[in-house]
Image (cartoon, rainbow, N blue to C red):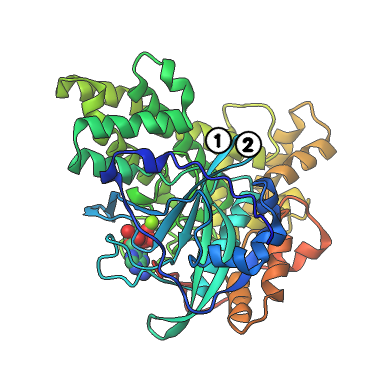
Amino acid sequence: MLNANWNFDNSYARLPERFFTRIHPTPVSDPELVMLNRSLAEELGLNVEALASEEGVAVFAGNHIPEGAEPLAQAYAGHQFGYFNMLGDGRAILLGEHVNSNGERVDIQLKGSGRTPYSRGGDGRAALGPMLREYIISEAMHALRIPTTRSLAVVTTGEVVIRETELRGAILTRVAASHLRVGTFQYAARFLSKEELQTLADYAIKRHYPNGEHASNRYLFLLEEVMKKQAALVAKWQLVGFIHGVMNTDNMTISGETIDYGPCAFMDVYDPKTVFSSIDTQGRYAYGNQPYIAGWNIARFAESLLPLFHDEEEKAIELAQEVIAPFPTLYETYWLKGMRAKLGLCTEEEEDKKLIGELLHLMHTHRADYTNTFRALTLDEWNFSEKEFRDWHTRWQQRIARQDMKKEEVYEFMRQNNPAIVPRNYRVEEALAAAEQGDNTVMERLLYVLSAPYAYTKEQDEYAKPPAPSDRPYRTFCGT
Ligand code: AMP
Ligand code: MG
C-alpha cells in the first residue's frame, strides 16, 4: 500500500466545540477519480500515485478517513443578499489541516460529501458539472495570480443527485489557507460568548496575521489586515473582469482568498452592470458593484468584532470606523496601480485616471470585449475603426512616449499584466458538456491553455475568441 503522505494537524478542531460539529462524510457507492491536480499535490508534498490509487480515491470520496484527519462541519452565519441567516457547512466536511514539509498549513475539505446538521433542506451533495466548473475556474484564477482556494481532485460518486433533472453526483476536494469567513465571525458575535469570539479572533490572527500578536490592539489590526487583503483581491477581480456572483459575507474569507465558485463567470463585453447569476435579479453583485459590496462586507466584519475593540460600544464603533474608512481609497489605489500596469504605464501622471476612464467609457459604449481590448493593445493590434478609439490610442501612445522605457519593454510589461485568455463561459460549458459524456480531453486542453494566461502562445489564440453573438444572455446557477 502506498503512503499518500497526508500530515494532519487540526487546529480548528481544537477550538471551542460550538464552532463545529464532528461528523464523517456519508460514504458513496462507487467512487471514480475524474480529476487529480498533480502540480498542487506535489506542492503539498503528497504522493500523486498514492492519491490516484483506490485508497487515495476513497479519501476523496469520503469513504476512507486518512490517519490524523478529524472530520467536521464548520458552523457559520452570513448575510445572503443582505439578509442574515444561520448557515454552516451544509454539504462540505473539513477533513482537517494538512501541513507540508515547509510548515505551510492548508484546509482539506470535501465538498458534496453528504448531509450535516447545517444542511437545512439540502441533500448535502453536489453534481459533477458544478464541481468541475469550480476546478477549472479556481485553477484559472490561481494561474492569473489571484489568491484563491485550489482544487485538488474531483471524484464521481456513482450516485445521482436530483436537481431539475438527474445528474451525476461528485465531490470536490478543496484546498484553502483556511475556511474562516466573515460569516464565521458573525456566527460567533451573534450566537456565542465574547470569550468564544475572542478565541476565534486570536485563532485567526495566529493563523493568518501572526504579526498582529504584537500589535497594540490586535483586533483592530486583524480588521485592517483583512480589509487590505479584500481591497487587493477585489481590485484583482476587477482587473481581469471576474464576477464572483455571490459575495455573501459567508463567501468572503479572512485569508483573502477567493472562495465559492458557484455562479461566478468572466465578463466578455465590458459593462459594469454585468450579472450572470440567475438569482441576482437586483444586480447586487454586478461587476461594477463588487468593490462597494466588499466594503459593505468588511463593515459587517467590523461589527462582529466590536466587543473586542473596546468595552464601551460607542468607542468601539469609533475605532472600527477609523480603520475601515479608507477602504474605498485603498481599493482605488490597488485598482489604479493594476490599471496602469495593464496600460504599460510605469510612471504616474495626474491624467492617468482620466485616460483609463475614457478607455472604459469607450469600451462600454461600443460594447468592446474586456479581455480582448487589453489584449489588442498589448499585441499592438489595435484595429478599432471608430475615430474615438483611434484618438484614444494616439493619446495613449503619447503618454507611453513620455516615460523612459523602450517600446519593447512596455509591451513586455503589458504581457505580464494582461491575460491573453480567461476561462470564457462558452469554453467552460463546452468542456463540461464533453466531461459529462465521459470525455475529459476538452477540459484537459482548456486547463492546459489556462495554466499560463500571460504566455501569449499561438495555441491560446483560438481560446481568445469571444463568444458568438447570442440572443440569450449567459446564466449561472448557485449551489447546484
Ligand atoms: P453557497 O451558496 O454554496 O455559499 O451555500 C450557501 C449555504 O447553503 C451553505 O451553508 C451551504 O453549505 C448550503 N448548501 C448549498 N448547497 C447545499 C446542498 N446541496 N445541501 C445542503 N446544503 C447546501
Ligand atoms: Mg458558500
Residue found at the far front of this picture: 1
Q: Amino acid at mark 1?
A: Leu
Q: Nearer the viewer, residue 401 or 100?
A: 100
The quadrant of the rendering that contains the N terminus is bottom right
* Measured Cα–Cα span from mark 1 to mark 2: 6 Å
131 w.r.t. 178: above or below: below
> Dividing the picture into quarters, in which one does residue 336 lie?
top right
- In the rendered image, which residue does mark 2 sit on? 340
**Residue at left offset 58%, top offset 31%:** 351
Which of 417 and 71 lies nearest the eye of the viewer?
Answer: 71
Q: Nearer the viewer, residue 317 or 406?
A: 317
Residue 242 in view here: yes
Q: Disc 1 vs disc 2: Cβ atoms closer than 8 Å?
A: yes
Q: Secondary structure at mark 2?
A: helix
Q: Residue at x 58, y 45 (%)?
A: 7
- The residue identified by callout 1 is 336
Considering only vertical position in the picture, is 97 above or below 204?
below
Name the image quarter holding residue 274: bottom left
* Residue 385 can be seen, yes or no: no
